[in-house]
Image: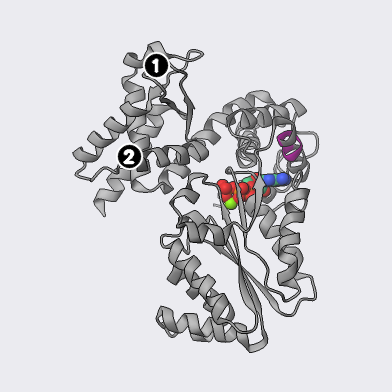
Amino acid sequence: MAELFDDIFKESKIFSKREVLSPHYIPHNLLFRDKQMQDIAKYMTPSLKGERGRNVFVYGKTGTGKTSCIKSVIEKVKGLPISKARITYINCRVYNSRYRILHKIVSDYLPLYAKRGYGIVDIYERIINWIEEDGKILVVVLDEIDSIKDLDDLVYTLTRANSDIKAGGITIVGVSNKVSFKEVLDPRSLSTLDENEIAFPPYNSNELSQIVKERVSEGFVKGVVDPAAVNLAAALAAKDSGDARLALKIIAKAGELAEEKGMTAVGPNEVTEAAKFAEEEIAYEIINTLPEHQRLIVYAIALLSLQGSRYKRLSNEGEQYLFSGDIYQKYVSVSQSLQKEAKSSRWYRKFISDLDMQGIIMSYESGKGIRGHTKLIKLAYPPEKIKESIEKTLQRDTAL
Ligand SMILES: Nc1ncnc2c1ncn2[C@@H]1O[C@H](COP(=O)(O)OP(=O)(O)OP(=O)(O)O)[C@@H](O)[C@H]1O
Ligand SMILES: [Mg+2]
């Protein structure tokens, strides 16, 4: 049986350090983000000195390095001689409510207390007392802040805490990749959150090339990856979204494909093949985590794209775009057939801009002439694959 495991111990001819290409790896050197890192550090400085700082709102499209930069700043802070500040990083996709977040803070700093299952008022008071003990400054980093269901309540509670606390305070660092999420916030929460803003613009193809190149030199056997392959991976990701995660995923997958084929080099062909896999994988991951109604909208778009022909005359560079209004109608009928209540068209427009931001769809405003001004929309991924994967998630949900 020993040969079963032979492959595991065989040295790879392609990868020298595979973990460097994992999505969880945080590179030592975050290229093109000096300004953003400095801004994060600058805005955290008062807190680190034990003074109340202003809240910060960090935003930018997916894969622009927000999480990596914040985590890397937090790591650097750990090496500093600070006494009063405590920084807590919270992934709000997991801790997605006020209760869970306050409970997480207590579990991190007062673990014995957290075990006893107190209610929210007790937890709140315990945190306040702990801060007041010696005038601590608690910096709460809320990554993917848009996932919090009762964000207005949370922001209200944390703001109120600051007026209850006599010594010390709480600073919020919110992070999001959704543009339109601000619109649904209570104006009071919004003005609390964006006292300072830091923007993360998408990377261009040249920047992505350098990011990929650096990672290749850390994780691949020297000389194995053709520079043309690096540039192609970067160009493909830049064209779609400027997303470094996608660029890195493509090159990692290209390496795996080369390895499977027993090759000793990674060239543009492997990258082209890998790009297809990588895009699909990312699409599925995103679609699987989308809220139900957004998924139904994507489903409606996939169905209409497959029906196709009626819209072909609107083709743009040979590609098919759909009318926003038609998609809404299809979404309503899909919802009805699943016995779900469709959301209003106002909500629909917000969803559409979220989907655009996440790179799941592409949209643009039509000029005058086509039904007045309207939005034209197209899926960024092959409709058949999308349709199949959503049908799977729908089956899973109805089986619950
Ligand atoms: N400037 C950079 N230099 C090197 N690697 C980078 C850089 N920016 C991003 N990456 C890499 O790209 C991937 C995505 O980055 P990250 O998770 O920080 O993005 P994000 O902005 O938080 O995305 P999302 O909005 O989807 O959460 C990670 O693997 C990260 O290591
Ligand atoms: Mg992130």
Does 167 appear above or below 397? below
Q: Is residue 210 magenta?
A: yes
Q: How far apart, in angstroms, are the residues tagged by discs 1 and 2?
A: 26 Å
Q: Is residue 86 magenta?
A: no
Asked whether residue 8 is in view, the answer is: no
Query: Image check: 381 left or right of 335?
Result: right
To which quarter of the image does residue 162 belong? bottom right
- Tell me the SS state at disc 1: loop
**Magenta portion: prevailing SS class:** helix
Counting other residues with Cα less than 10 Å from the Cα at mark 2, is it few (<14), some (14-19), or many (20 or more)? many
Outermost residue toward the bottom? Answer: 133
- The correct choice, above or below, for 347 with respect to 126 in the image is above
Residue under numbered circle 1: 370
Residue nearer the viewer, 76 or 10: 76
Question: Which residue type carries mark 1?
Answer: Ile
| Colouring | one colour
Crowding at mark 1 (Cα within 10 Å: few <14, some 14-19, many 20+): few
Q: What is the number of callouts on the image?
A: 2
The image shows residue 79 at horizontal and vertical percentages of 78, 70
| Element at label 2 | helix
Residue at position x 54%, y 81% from top?
A: 164
- Which image quarter: residue 118? bottom left
| Residue 116 image offset from top left, x and y in percent | 43, 85
- x, y percentage for residue 10? 68, 46
Question: What span is in magenta?
Answer: 208-212
The answer to which of 285 and 69 lies nearer the viewer is 69
Furthest-top residue in this view: 313
- Which kind of residue does numbered mark 2 sit on? Leu
Contact flag, marks 1 and 2 (Cβ < 8 Å): no
